[in-house]
Amino acid sequence: MRSTRSYVATKLSVLGLLSIGIWACGEANDGGTSSAGGGAPDETTSSSAETTATVGTGGAATTGAGGATAGSTSSSSSSSSASTAEASSSASGGETVGTGGEPGECVKGQTKGNQVAVIGESFIAATHGITQQIEKQAKANGSLPQNDRYIDNSVSGTTLANDQIPSQYRKAAENGMIKYVLMDGGGNDCLLRGDGDAALAAAQSLFETMEKDNVEKVVYFFYPDPIGNNFSSLKSCLDTLRPKMKALCDGLTSPKCYWLDLRPTWNGHNEYTQDGIHPTSAGSIATGDAVWEVMKENCVAQ
């Protein structure tokens, strides 16, 4: 009997130890140990979620055992993109560029007068009324300070082929600030020399110089039809030169060139000229407004 009791006591002791071991293993699993199937227990998942923190005002992120949160990465990327866009806007004189490099919103008030050159001959220079009208529109639209002006180096009687109009650009570019050029050219090459091809070659060389100088955009406004029988040879030369010069302008990517044919603006408005080729005050205003519309549509000097 005594040996039987001893045997039973021994068995009970062994069972008690086994129960304690099983209870201890259960506690360990409940505390966060991964299951045999590889999945994390619910309590561990909840704990990791609670340790994840988003970026605050200072930009620091709290991370759990797995590292930085997605919110931190997203917030940092957004901040970096915004800085890039802002810097690009400042550098380009008004054009905001997104992270992909595509032009975005056109920002006004980023251009100074000494960043815009106006070059050409008497169509502009006879009264400088075209430049004055463009400046008036720019100031009214918040694109040019009220006390500022463009660099207008246009001179009557000048041509493209003999380097006179190109030299007007080079003089303006001496300050190293020119980003935009508003110009005509070729009229006197036709009127005085009857040589449109020479004007075309000179324009191509001029655009190459502008590219080296990092000029961004050009608006090339080309003449309306001259009025009067005494300008038949001039009209013939301009009609031949116009499509060639347009093709040159349209093909440029650096600087980007925007072509404006003034014939639709002038057709039916004989009051726009007194001598058949040069603009009156009304003609200058109409031309200046047409140039400004092209500038506004293409974020030129805004």
Image (cartoon, rainbow, N blue to C red):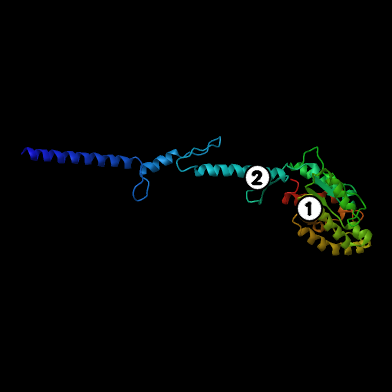
The first of marks 2 and 1 along the sequence is 2
The part of the image, by quadrant, that contains residue 136 is top right
Residue indicated by mark 2: 85
Residue position marked by numbered label 1 in the rendering: 211
Task: State left or right for residue 61 relative to residue 130.
Answer: left
Q: Few, some or many C-alpha atoms within 10 Å of disc 1 (few <14, some 14-19, many ≥20)?
A: some
142 or 98: nearer the eye?
Answer: 98
Q: Residue 148 placed where, x, y %?
A: 81, 39
Tag 1 secondary structure: helix
**Image quarter of the N terminus:** top left
Query: What is the x, y in percent for residue 131?
Result: 83, 47
Residue 254: which quarter of the image? bottom right
User: Is disc 2 in contact with disc 1, using a CB cutoff of under 8 Å?
Assistant: no
Q: Which secondary structure lies at badge 2? A: helix
Q: Amino acid at mark 2?
A: Ala
* Residue 279 in view of the camera: no
Q: How many marks?
A: 2
Q: Label 2, label 1: how many angstroms apart (C-alpha)? A: 23 Å
